[in-house]
Amino acid sequence: ATVKGFFTVNDPFDLPIFAFEGTEQYKIIGSGDQSIVIFRPNEWRGTVPEPIPFSRKNTLSSKEMSRRISDLPKGTVTHVYVTSDGGADLNLIYDMVQYLKPHVKIVNQNTIVRMALEREEHKKQSRSTHRSAVFK
């Protein structure tokens, strides 16, 4: 099997990653069959009794994380990297999932990479169609 995606983490603190602009969730490197998806760091450490410096958005409750994910624009392709160093465990994940809005889909790592590649291809086709319509 060929590696098609990387899920980056920002450790030990959530410092800005300037390679990702604004709300950009991933980057595609290469093209065609050689494409690789690199996902922006998006850790969820669980709830902690004492705040971790620069990491408030990574130490949300299950309801807060559910809201954060559910409120992303429809069509967003992103991941959540769950780590137990802040107290996250499977029960917290199960609790969070029950609060997600119906349009949010939970998928595995292979599916999310495919979704990102398909979304980028769709965006390219849309831009190409728009340019064709403008120049006719």
Image (tube, rainbow, N blue to C red):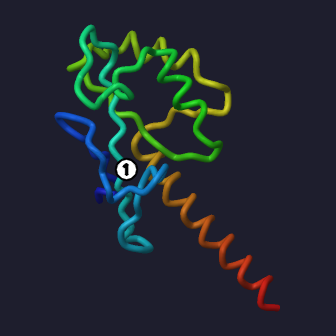
Q: Is residue 102 above or below residue 23?
A: above
Q: Nearer the viewer, residue 121 or 12?
A: 12
Give the labeled residue for mark 1. 39
Q: Quadrant of residue 61?
A: top left
**Image quadrant where one finds the N terminus:** bottom left
Name the residue at the bottom extreme: 136
Name the residue at the right extreme: 136
Q: Is residue 6 above or below residue 109?
A: below
Residue at 30%, 23% (x, y): give it.
45
Pinpoint residue 81: horizontal percent, then vertical percent: 33, 33
Q: Quadrant of residue 119?
A: bottom right
Pinpoint residue 86: horizontal percent, then vertical percent: 25, 18
Pinpoint residue 107: horizontal percent, then vertical percent: 49, 36
Pinpoint residue 77: horizontal percent, then vertical percent: 52, 46
Residue at 42%, 74% (x, y): give it.
31
| In the image: residue 108, left or right of residue 56 | right
The kind of residue tagged 1 is Phe
| In the image: residue 103, left or right of residue 78 | right
Q: Nearer the viewer, residue 68 or 99?
A: 68
**Image quadrant where one finds the C terminus:** bottom right
Q: Quadrant of residue 48?
A: top left
Residue at 59%, 23% (x, y): give it.
100
